[in-house]
Image (spheres, rainbow, N blue to C red):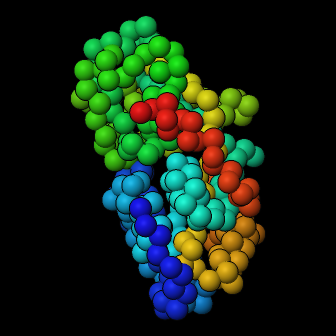
């Protein structure tokens, strides 16, 4: 992937969202966020929804997108190419999360009983929806290409979980809070499918933790604009409108400054998933 030279003169600021929570919800997010950022930056803002995680990374690196709300592995990929991640989300006081490998309730699947099943994943760059579960399975001696009859990529957590419910897949990965919060995989399931949906799934296993999603900014963006954007995200919790965005758009309690090169550990996870 190539990186364009800086071009800070573009009149419209372009912000990209991932497709991971479904296209309808993403479109609603785009409208909310666009209006807020336009007011904060004092310039026109276009918010779009990328068709995949790979496209999201390419748009950031090429300068087609000025900034994005990006999953951890997209942050890692772009950060390694010189893109700076301004802030990352904080949930329940934590700046990390884990994945849960789940099946339909009553299915009776365990790590020892995965041979011959079908998996529904989100995207090849989805940390909780693919990378963490696959790395975990390999560490446990389960090779997905050999163990699974098929592996499908649905493009969203909703798609993966619904595939398990309707029987077109047997297992899926979903994000969930770290163990220290005392919360379980049902918190992630219900964030995607709604209250009570957690009872429709059983846990197979939890994975290691990974850094939360972040906001990388393209090298095309002038430093003063990046500074305003960073301050805008860090101050979201201080207003009712910002709190609504945190809840509805980012599923976070607040943002914190992202440490430089804070996503490097994810490359080990990516290599383990190959």
Residue 232 visible (yes or no)? no
Tag count: 0
Q: Position of residue 50 (x, y in %)?
A: 38, 62
Residue 160 % position (x, y): 35, 37
Name the quadrant containing residue 173: top left
Q: Residue 221, relative to residue 194: is it above or below?
A: below
- Considering depth in this image, is 40 or 265 the residue closer to the camera? 265
Relative depth, front residue between 46 and 227 = 227
- Residue 208 vs 214, above or below: the answer is above
Name the residue: 58% across, 79% down: 221
Q: Quadrant of residue 266?
A: top right
Q: Residue at x 33, y 28 (%)?
A: 119
Quadrant in the picture for residue 187:
top right
Q: Residue at x 49, y 30 (%)?
A: 272
Above or below, 94 against 146 in this view is below
Quadrant of the image for the N terminus? bottom left
Give the residue displayed 49% in from the left and 35% down from the top.
271
Q: Which percent across, then down, holds residue 108?
A: 40, 11
Vertical placement of 128 versus 133: above or below?
below
Q: Quadrant of the C terminus?
A: top left
Left or right of residue 64, residue 214 in this image = right
**Is any atom of residue 119 visible in this view?**
yes
Task: Locate residue 150, reporting x and y percent.
Answer: 25, 26
Q: Nearer the viewer, residue 154 or 73?
A: 73
């Amino acid at each position: 992937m190539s990186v364009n030279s800086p071009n800070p003169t573009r009149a419209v600021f372009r912000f990209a969202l991932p497709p991971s929570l479904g296209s309808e919800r993403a479109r609603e997010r785009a409208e909310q966020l666009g209006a807020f950022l336009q007011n904060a930056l004092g310039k026109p803002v276009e918010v779009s929804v990328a068709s995949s995680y790979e496209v999201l990374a390419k748009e950031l690196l090429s300068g087609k997108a000025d900034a994005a709300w990006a999953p951890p592995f997209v942050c890692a990929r772009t950060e390694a190419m010189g893109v700076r991640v301004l802030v990352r989300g904080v949930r329940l006081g934590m700046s990390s999360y884990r994945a849960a490998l789940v099946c339909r309730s009553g299915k009776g699947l365990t790590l020892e009983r995965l041979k011959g099943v079908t998996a529904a994943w989100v995207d090849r760059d989805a940390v909780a929806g693919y990378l963490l579960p696959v790395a975990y399975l390999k560490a446990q001696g389960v090779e997905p290409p050999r163990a699974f009859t098929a592996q499908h990529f649905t493009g969203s957590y909703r798609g993966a979980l619904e595939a398990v419910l309707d029987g077109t897949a047997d297992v899926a990965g979903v994000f969930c809070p770290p163990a220290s919060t005392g919360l379980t995989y049902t918190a992630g399931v219900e964030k995607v499918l709604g209250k009570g949906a957690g009872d429709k799934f059983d846990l197979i296993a939890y994975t290691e933790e990974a850094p939360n999603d972040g906001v990388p900014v393209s090298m095309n963006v002038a430093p003063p604009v990046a500074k305003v954007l960073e301050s805008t995200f860090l101050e979201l919790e201080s207003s009712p409108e910002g709190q609504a965005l945190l809840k509805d758009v980012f599923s976070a309690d607040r943002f914190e400054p992202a440490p430089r090169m804070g996503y490097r550990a994810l490359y080990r996870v990516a290599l383990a998933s190959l």
